Amino acid sequence: MIDFNYSPKTYFDGTGPSALIAKLSYPESQWGEEISIYAATLDGEIFYEVVDFYGNEFKTNPEKSSKPLTLQNLIFLIETLEVIDLKNKGDVNLTISGIPEAKSNLYPQLGDYFDEKRKNFGML
């Protein structure tokens, strides 16, 4: 059973100003798209940034929080990603409309959630 209320105590281990929260890959994409989600702290708030190979700019929901997200909130952030660059590269809008394979050291059940979703849609 997936614990949607799970939240790590912190994203940061003292080794740098930002932390990798999750890595998403979209195997059905002809480009083999991979997207990384990072957290960075500024003035006591945690800001979320999404990075892809092409340098597209993404809008996250939420954009920031005062504490680490619950698993449910992280899933929502992933499933509502939007490209804000009108000249997006790599047709990323089509890619992010799919169901990713997800990996996260901070959210161990994130991959299980998306694996189950991919299975339900016949992708596994």
Image: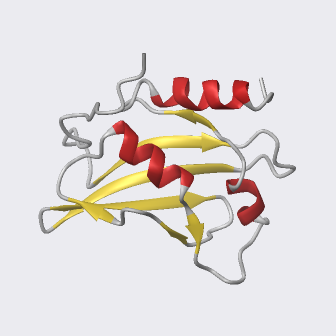
Q: Nearer the viewer, residue 91 or 55?
A: 91
Q: Quadrant of the N terminus?
A: top left
* Residue 17 lies in quadrant: bottom left
* Residue 84 lies in quadrant: bottom right
Q: Nearer the viewer, residue 61 or 51?
A: 61
Q: Residue at x 36, y 66 (%)?
A: 63
- Above or below — where is 8 with respect to 33? above
Measuring from the top left, give residue 78's x and y in whole percent: 52, 51
Q: Nearer the viewer, residue 43 or 120?
A: 120
- Residue 21 falls left or right of residue 17: right
Measuring from the top left, give residue 35's x and y in whole percent: 60, 51
Measuring from the top left, give residue 97's x and y in whole percent: 70, 55
- Above or below — where is 103 with respect to 65? above
Q: Residue at x 26, y 35 (%)?
A: 7
Q: How is the image coloured?
A: secondary structure
Count every numbered label the image shows and give the total: 0
- Residue 94 falls left or right of residue 108: right
